[in-house]
Each structure stands twice: as structure tokens, then as C-alpha cells.
Amino acid sequence: MKITVIGCGRWGSLITWYLSSRKGHDLTLYGRPSSPHMKRFLAERRNDLLVLPEGVRLSTDLADCLTPDCETVVISVGAQGLRALMEELSAYDLARKTFVLCMKGIEATTGKRLTEVVAEYLPHSASVAVWVGPGHVQEFYAGIPNCMVIDSEDEDTKKRLVEAFSGDIIRFYYGTDLIGSEIGAAAKNVVGIAAGMLDGVGLTTLKGALMSRGTREIARLISAMGGSELSAYGLCHLGDYEATVFSRFSHNRAFGEAFVKGEPYAELAEGYATVRALTLLGKTYAVELPICTAVYRILYEGADPQRELDTLFGRELKTEFYV
């Protein structure tokens, strides 16, 4: 399979490294000429975490990457930059290509799922899938295995990708609910920020309650949007909590902790924009999202973190537990 990976950050480069180890794949990693990540790859074929095999082709030219024989385009960029990227890609022939989205987010201004954004720019002959689930670059590169999910509305696309991408360090499951897979994967980043906030104010022991209530909250939203509540309890959401709520590698958890401590944080935390989209979806579908609302109030409205978290966990447990 001829594959182009768009996005040369930590996840895009890991995907490239991983897929290059699978027999029968021809890998090209694309990055913008101005990207410091790509400049280093071109000079050294490495970043701070991994080394790319010599067989991986590097390119800064989209026309060179999107040739007719390129079957699969894996996208790993910031979720809020996806629409601009698709506008750029729409200038090329995208017919019969499969697009695999590897970021976890929702368009903040519209509440649209990322597959919905991409579909606006694809011809009918193209297909789109998502790659979600737990795992960090540092662990995968060290050979530590994990389980992930590929989901798509097109069954043939899903089957082909799972068979082509599965390997010793990533076991893929077939997703059965694209809405749930996308919303669950995006929302776990908001729960990760909330977890970091708990760490920051000395309430780490409440993470168990956060995980339980966070899963139920997102399950209600998925159901209201037409998906399956069960998806929230799968790898896309609850199954990703260890990597997001506890791991020292979690950017969202680290961002939440830094935010409540008043410390700077330079890395991308997708949950920051995602919580805007989730509060929008909560209003649209009339679903109460107390955790998302608390995180939104702290991040965007200047609410006091300690008071907001105390209020959140002081809610009536019986009502919260059974609604």
C-alpha cells in the first residue's frame, strides 16, 4: 500500500515509523518546508523521540505526495487546522483515496466531527476513516504494545485498514459506531484536562469519580447524537483514560495541571479547543455536561478552579449516578 502521512509532529512521525515496519507499505512523510520538525528530519532523519528508517521518503511537496498511485492519506495535524488543510488538499485529485484521521478533536466553531469536515472536500469515490485509542509515542517506540480502533462508515475501508495496519505493537479492533468513536476520542482529552486540574489543586484522589462520571456524561451525549452509549466505555474513551488521565506523557493532563497552577505550557492540548465544541453540542442536543462545563468555565470564563471543582464534586450523587 502506498501511504502518505501528512504531519511530521510526534504522532505523525510515530505512525510513519510504525507503518514502515509493516511489509508491503511504501511510506512518504510530508511536512511543510517551514516546519522545524521537517527541517530536522531532512537533516538527521530523527526527532527527540525516534529515528525514521532509510526506506521512508521525506517530502515538502504536496503534489509529489498526492500522486494518483497514492492509495492512503494519513492525516495527523492539529484538529482545528484540519479544515484549512482540506481546503489546500482540494486543489489536488483526491479520487479513490482513503483518508485516515489520527487526531482526536471536534471543530470548535461548528461542533462538527472531523470526518464531517473532511467529507465536505472529498469526491464520492474517496473514503474516510478514524484511527483512535490509547497509546503514547514514547511507549510505542519502546516496543510497548497497546490496542486501538479503526472506524469508518465504509465497511470495506475499515476491513482493509485493520488488516493492513495491525502489527505486533498495535492490535486494531473494528469500530462499529463512527459517531461514538469520534466524540469519545475527542472528549477524553477534556477529561484529561480535568484530571490535570485535580492534580494541580491537590485532589488527585477524585480521579476515580472523574473517570466514572466523565464516561457517563459522554455516553449521554453520544446517544443523543445518534451513536451508541457503549462506545464511551470502549477504547476510544474509557479505554484511553490511563494514557490521558494518569500518564506523565499526557499533554492534556499536564496542561490542566499547569493551567490551575498559573504555569506556562507550550505543547498542544487538543482538549482546550474541544471543550468549546462539546459545550456547543451539549446545548444543541440538550445534554447536561457538568464536567465539560466546569472545564470550560475555568479555561474560558476565569472561574476559580478550586471553587468550580468543589462545586462539581458536590453535586447530588444519587441524581447524578442514575441520570
Image (cartoon, grey):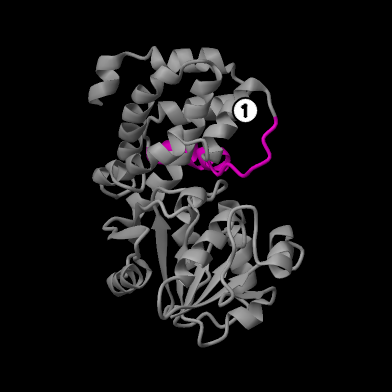
The residue closer to the viewer here, 237 or 285, is 237
Q: Residue furthest right?
A: 34
Q: Quadrant of residue 241?
A: top left
Residue 237, above or below 132 = above
Main SS of the magenta segment? helix
Q: Which residues are magenta?
A: 264-285
Residue 238 quadrant = top left
Residue 215 is left or right of residue 272, and the answer is left
Q: Quadrant of residue 21?
A: bottom left
> Looking at the image, which residue is at 29% across and 55% down?
177
Of residue 253 and residue 136, the one placed in the foreground of this image is 136
Which residue is at a point 43% across and 80% down the rendered structure image? 1
User: Considering the numbered disc 1 on the image, is that residue within a helix, a strand or a loop?
Assistant: helix
Q: Is residue 62 among the parts visible in the rendering? A: yes
Identify residue for label 1.
Answer: 258
Mark 1 nearby-residue class (10 Å; few <14, some 14–19, many ≥20): some
Residue 281 makes an appearance in the image = no
Identify which amino acid the numbered label 1 is placed on. Ala
- Asked if 41 appears above or below 147 in the picture, the reply is below
Name the outermost residue toward the front.
Answer: 142
Residue 84 x %, y %: 64, 62
- Is 69 drawn above or below residue 160 in the view shown? below
Q: How many marks?
A: 1
Which corner quadrant holds the C terminus? top left
